[in-house]
Structures are given as C-alpha cells and as structure tokens.
Amino acid sequence: MDRITQKDLECLRDQINIATDSPMAAYTKTDKPPYTGNVDHYRLDYAYGGVKLVRVCSTGGGIDTISTGGFGTKRELYNWMTAFLAGMIA
C-alpha cells in the first residue's frame, strides 16, 4: 500500500472543484476587505494531526464540513474523497 501524501489529497480536491465547477482558489484578493471567500470552493482543513474536506460557504470565509467523522487520517480522507468524486461523476 502506497503512502497517501498531502499532494494526493490536493489533486483529489482539485478534481472535485473541477467536477462541481467551483473556484480553484479559496480566496480572491480585493480592495475592501483584503480577501473575499470564493463560495463553493472545496479545500482541505488540517488540525489535531488530521485532515477533513470542507467547502467555503460565505464570502467571509465560513466553511461547511463535507467529509464525515471529523479530522481523520490522510488515507481515510483519500478513500472518502475518491468515493465522493465517483458518486458525483456517476
């Protein structure tokens, strides 16, 4: 079994953003306020040694948790994101 890296998760995240026609960047630089959240962008959130998939839901940068089970291992999230993407494409 190969090791799952942050790059593997980022590639899957990008594929999900493409499949949902979502912005590829989490934030856009503007004059006021300095940054605006790109609504519907999927991104990775890291804490407590784990990772989860979230989606930006407001221009202020608020997020919704998309993956279940809180912060998990990279392998758990990789498997979850693969199934999530397969369900969207099917």
Image (spheres, helix red, strand yellow):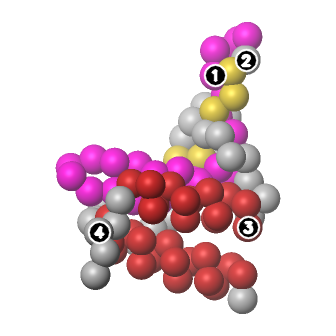
Q: Residues within 10 Å of mark 4 (few under 14, many from 20)?
A: few
Dot 2: what SS? loop
**In the figure, 49 relative to 36: above or below?**
below
Are discs 2 and 1 less than 8 Å apart at CB? yes
* In this rendering, the label closer to the viewer, 1 or 4: 4
Residue 35, quarter of picture: top right
* In this rendering, the label closer to the viewer, 1 or 3: 3
Quote the CA–CA distance across marks 1 and 4. Answer: 35 Å
Q: Residue type at mark 1?
A: Tyr
Dot 3: what SS? helix
Q: Residue at x 57, y 36 (%)?
A: 61
State which tag comes first along the sequence, 1 or 3.
3
Q: Is residue 34 magenta?
A: yes
Farthest residue, direction front: 2
Quote the CA–CA distance across marks 1 and 3. Answer: 25 Å
Q: Residues within 10 Å of mark 3 (few under 14, many from 20)?
A: few
Quote the CA–CA distance across marks 3 and 2. Answer: 26 Å
Q: Residue type at mark 3?
A: Ala
Residue 33, position in %: x, y? 66, 15
Residue that carries the numbered disc 4 in the rendered image? 3
* In this rendering, the label closer to the viewer, 3 or 2: 3
Quote the CA–CA distance across marks 2 and 4. Answer: 38 Å
